[in-house]
Amino acid sequence: QVQLQESGPGLVKPSQTLSLTCTVSGGSISSGSYYWSWIRQPAGKGLEWIGRIYTSGSTNYNPSLKSRVTISADASKNQFSLKLSSVTAADTAVYYCARDRGSAYQYWGQGTLVTVSS
Amino acid sequence: DIQMTQSPSSLSASVGDRVTITCQASQDINNYLHWYQQKPGKAPKALIYDASNLETGVPSRFSGSGSGTDFTFTISSLQPEDTATYYCQQYDNLPLLFGGGTKVEIK
């Protein structure tokens, strides 16, 4: 059974870079035909797709965040990561990592709350 | 970008009622439309993929239909454990987009 777990600082100062890691167990991020994604959800609001990295290493980003987002993977640690630069209070949200097979997201992390505040 | 319009934003129904949620895309997304259930404090859970296919282990009272731009999600007989927010998601074009959500409550 594939499991995903987000980790990283819960508090980030404005203008700094938010960095989160998703650790995958029960399957390799470098095998199969899967997309490994980041999705966020501000409190009381809907879901926003941030971007994804494919098994091959290719990436896609939401244009609304593209200038500030980098998603990368470390196969040796079976992890993939999110970096979001120049954060503001509007980036405060629960951040989820998730996996899909080119269809619906079957596997999700539990989510991690990141608050942007000085 | 494709726009996803989900309605209603909330509804209240009795146990045993039939509940219907709609999702409309601003352009043809074929059948690349998924439905999720999210309970408070939890990650979303996929219920329906590719418009009408039930994910493994999901009760058969959940169903989906539609193609092109108009999609429907139905709970045939609402149960207390179905209290949640439901989201549609299009998978036809990037960026992947979710609908605004429908909060389902029990009367």
Image: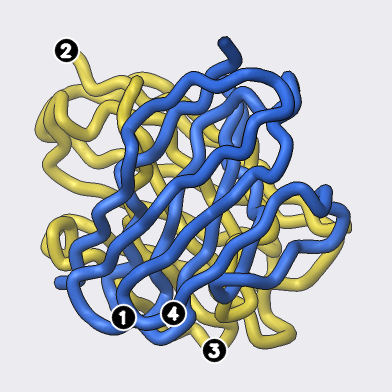
* Front position among marks 2 and 1: 1
Question: Where does the C terminus of chain A fall, quadrant-wise?
Answer: top left
Q: Amino acid at mark 4?
A: Ser
**Quadrant assignment, res A13:** top left
Count of labels in the image: 4
Q: Report the mark closest to the observer, 4 or 3.
A: 4
Q: Quadrant of the N terminus of chain A?
A: bottom right
Asked if disc 3 and disc 1 are in contact, CB closer than 8 Å, the reply is no
- Whole-number angstrom distance, CA of label 4 to CA of label 2: 47 Å
Chain coloured yellow: A
User: Mark 1 — on which chain does it sit?
Assistant: B
Determine which residue is flagged by label 2. A118
Q: Colour of chain B?
A: blue
Residues under numbered marks 4 and 2 in contact, where contact means CB atoms less than 8 Å apart: no
Q: Are marks 4 and 2 on the same chain?
A: no
- Identify the residue at image location x=74%, y=64%: B54
Which chain is home to disc 2? A
Circle 4 residue: B67
Mark 3, residue position: A56
Q: Secondary structure at mark 1?
A: loop
